[in-house]
Image (cartoon, coloured by chain):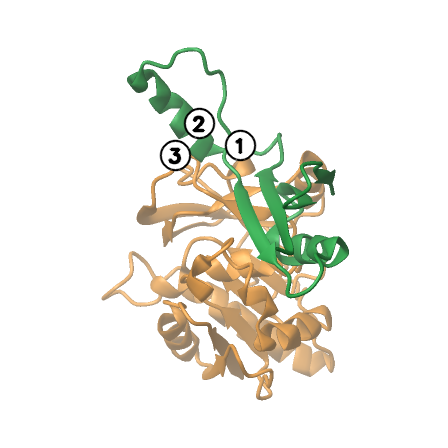
Chain colours: A orange, B green
């Protein structure tokens, strides 16, 4: 399986995301923001960082990168896409996910190991977890406060599209402690904390992040077996 | 000059922690009669020819403002009358 990792000008965690994909057993394929060719990848990770300097708003300019036009089309067709931190912001700006990420309520950049409770496990990127599983992965953001109108928040909850919530402390003021969400089809997931930084005992607080990458491999294997590329693989 | 000004503000229901931080600092300046501060962004667009409000509105809607969290107003710079988007 080939997992593409996009590099925008200002991306920081593309190397770690590619490494996490390799550790999970995938072939990591580096994608360049100015190249609309997805090089036949089976899934895409939009990494953390500060794409285009985070000028205007986080993710606002990256959304119009040539590679994003291809990714937006492919995601609507079922391609699994994971946006981490800045990647989550890009997915919201691209309207692949609802809501927006705004300045942390306390205005401080927050960098720490963060406990999450996984909720939706019927997505392409979370099917290796169990509902209610508590995981520990690093969070590091200045603009990670998830906001949406009440109707959108209610529908996310009602449709089971919250994939993870912050527990033991909300690091940024996100509404309803939301750390990550998915689209209706379950193939597009955005998460503010960084699973790619929790894949090795030497450098991470846990190996919990690996589950996101092994999940997509299982989803892709299932999709191949079913002859379709669907995100919503049930456990 | 063919300048169009775009003012982008967070929607009223969106918390503005920057504005709150400024408001909380005002008493240190001896200012005690301010109840609220909200911070937005002013963008000046210079057209090569005539100012094009429709084009400016499109730019604002697609790029300059995020309609999920922000409202915008546009106006031609010489014209004091603001046009609400």
Q: Tell me the residue that label 3 is attached to.
A: A106
Q: Where is residue B51 in the image (x, y as percent from the top left)?
A: 70, 56
Query: CA gap, disc 1 to disc 3?
Result: 11 Å
Position above or below: A135 against A178: below
Position above or below: A235 against A142: below
Q: For the point 32% across and 14% down, which residue is it?
A: B30
Q: Residue B15 carries which label?
A: 1
The quadrant where residue A176 appears: top right
Q: Mark 1 lies on which chain?
A: B
Closest to the observer: A200 or A64? Answer: A64
Position above or below: A84 against A104: below
Closest to the observer: B24 or A146? Answer: B24
Q: Mark 3 lies on which chain?
A: A
Q: Where is residue A143 in the image (x, y as percent from the top left)?
A: 44, 47
Q: Which chain carries label 2?
A: B
Quadrant location, the N terminus of chain A: bottom right
Question: Does residue A168 show up?
Answer: yes
Q: Which of marks 2 and 1 is in front?
A: 2
Closest to the observer: A109 or A16? Answer: A109
Lower position in the chain sequence, tag 2 or tag 1 = 1
Q: Residue A52 carries which label?
A: none
Q: For the point 31% across and 19% down, which residue is it?
A: B29
Along the horizontal axis of the image, is A10 left or right of A36? Answer: left
Provide the secondary structure element on which disc 3 rests: loop
The quadrant where residue A222 appears: bottom right
Quadrant location, the C terminus of chain A: bottom right
Q: Tell me the residue that label 2 is attached to.
A: B20
Along the horizontal axis of the image, is B11 left or right of B24? Answer: right
Query: CA gap, disc 3 to disc 2?
Result: 10 Å
Q: What residue occupies the far left of the structure in this picture?
A: A202
């Amino acid at each position: 399986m080939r997992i593409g990792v996009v590099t925008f000008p200002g991306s920081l965690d593309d190397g770690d995301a590619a490494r996490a994909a390799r550790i999970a057993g995938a072939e990591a394929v580096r994608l360049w923001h100015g190249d609309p060719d997805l090089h036949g990848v089976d899934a895409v990770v939009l990494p953390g960082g500060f794409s285009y300097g985070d000028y205007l708003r986080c993710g606002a300019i990256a959304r119009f990168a040539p590679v994003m036009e291809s990714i937006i089309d492919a995601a609507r067709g079922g391609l699994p896409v994971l946006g981490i931190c800045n990647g989550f912001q890009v997915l919201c700006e691209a309207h692949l996910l609802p809501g927006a990420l705004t300045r942390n309520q306390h205005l401080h950049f927050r960098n720490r190991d963060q406990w999450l409770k996984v909720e939706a496990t019927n997505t392409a990127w979370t099917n290796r977890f169990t509902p209610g599983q508590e995981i520990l992965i690093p969070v590091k953001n200045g603009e990670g406060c998830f906001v949406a109108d009440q109707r959108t928040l209610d529908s996310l909850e009602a449709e089971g599209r919250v994939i993870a919530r912050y527990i033991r402390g909300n690091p940024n003021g996100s509404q309803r402690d939301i750390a990550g969400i998915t689209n209706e089809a379950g193939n597009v997931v955005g998460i503010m904390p960084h699973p790619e930084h929790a894949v090795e005992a030497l450098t991470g607080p846990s190996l919990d992040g690996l589950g996101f990458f092994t999940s997509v491999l299982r989803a892709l294997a299932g999709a191949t077996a079913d002859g379709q590329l669907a995100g919503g693989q049930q456990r | 000059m063919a300048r169009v000004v775009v003012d982008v503000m967070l929607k009223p229901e969106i918390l503005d922690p920057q504005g709150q931080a400024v408001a909380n600092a005002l008493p240190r300046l001896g200012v005690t009669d301010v109840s609220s501060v909200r911070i937005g962004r002013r963008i000046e667009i210079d057209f090569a020819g005539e100012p094009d409000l429709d084009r400016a509105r499109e730019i604002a809607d697609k790029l300059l403002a995020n309609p999920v969290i922000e409202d915008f107003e546009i106006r031609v710079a010489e014209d004091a009358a603001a046009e609400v988007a």
